[in-house]
Image (tube, helix red, strand yellow):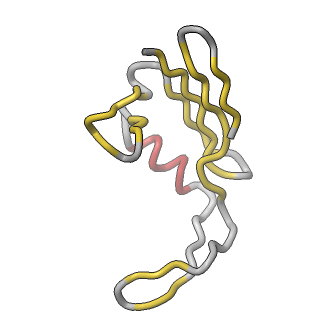
């Protein structure tokens, strides 16, 4: 991730998650598992949702913007889900 701080805004840009790679071991209540996100999964999710939000610490009370507001851009490429957000106070 690249973070750029200016006088009146912060720009965050980089990959949120990769596709076609096996994760580190993860745990659930039934045991350990590995996760792999298939190519195209993010593209399909973006197409199905007309407004995707960027939240601070997954908290809806700290909504920093959205694709509909125009300050969040999301796209999937051969690496994974790429995000670019411009956040102003």
- Which residue is pictured at 55% across the width and 29% down the height? 73
Location of the N terminus (image quadrant): top right
Q: Nearer the viewer, residue 81 or 39?
A: 81
Does residue 24 lie above or below 58 as drawn?
below
Location of the C terminus (image quadrant): top left
Give the quadrant of residue 22: bottom right
Does residue 67 lie above or below 1 as drawn?
above
- Which residue is pictured at 73% across the width and 52% down the height? 79
Residue placed farthest to the bottom in the image? 31
Q: Would residue 68 appear left or right of 44 to someone viewing this image? A: left
Does residue 55 lie above or below 73 as drawn?
below
Q: Would residue 49 appear left or right of 73 to someone viewing this image? A: left
Q: How many marks?
A: 0
Give the quadrant of residue 19: bottom right
Q: Position of residue 47 (x, y in %)?
A: 45, 41
Q: Would residue 58 appear left or right of 10 to someone viewing this image? A: left
Residue placed farthest to the left in the image? 61
Q: Nearer the viewer, residue 88 or 23?
A: 88
Does residue 38 lie above or below 75 as drawn?
below
Q: Position of residue 16 (x, y in %)?
A: 59, 48
Residue placed farthest to the right in the image? 78
Q: Nearer the viewer, residue 21 or 28?
A: 28
Q: Would residue 76 appear left or right of 56 to someone viewing this image? A: right
Q: Position of residue 37 (x, y in %)?
A: 58, 65
């Amino acid at each position: 991730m690249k973070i750029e701080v200016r006088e009146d805004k912060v720009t965050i840009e980089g990959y949120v998650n990769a596709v076609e790679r096996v994760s580190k071991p993860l745990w659930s209540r039934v045991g350990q598992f590995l996760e792999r996100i298939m190519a195209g999964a993010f593209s399909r999710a973006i197409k199905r949702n007309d407004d995707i939000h960027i939240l601070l610490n997954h908290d809806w009370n700290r909504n920093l913007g959205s694709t509909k507001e125009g300050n969040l851009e999301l796209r999937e490429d051969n690496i994974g889900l790429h995000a670019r957000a411009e956040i102003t106070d």
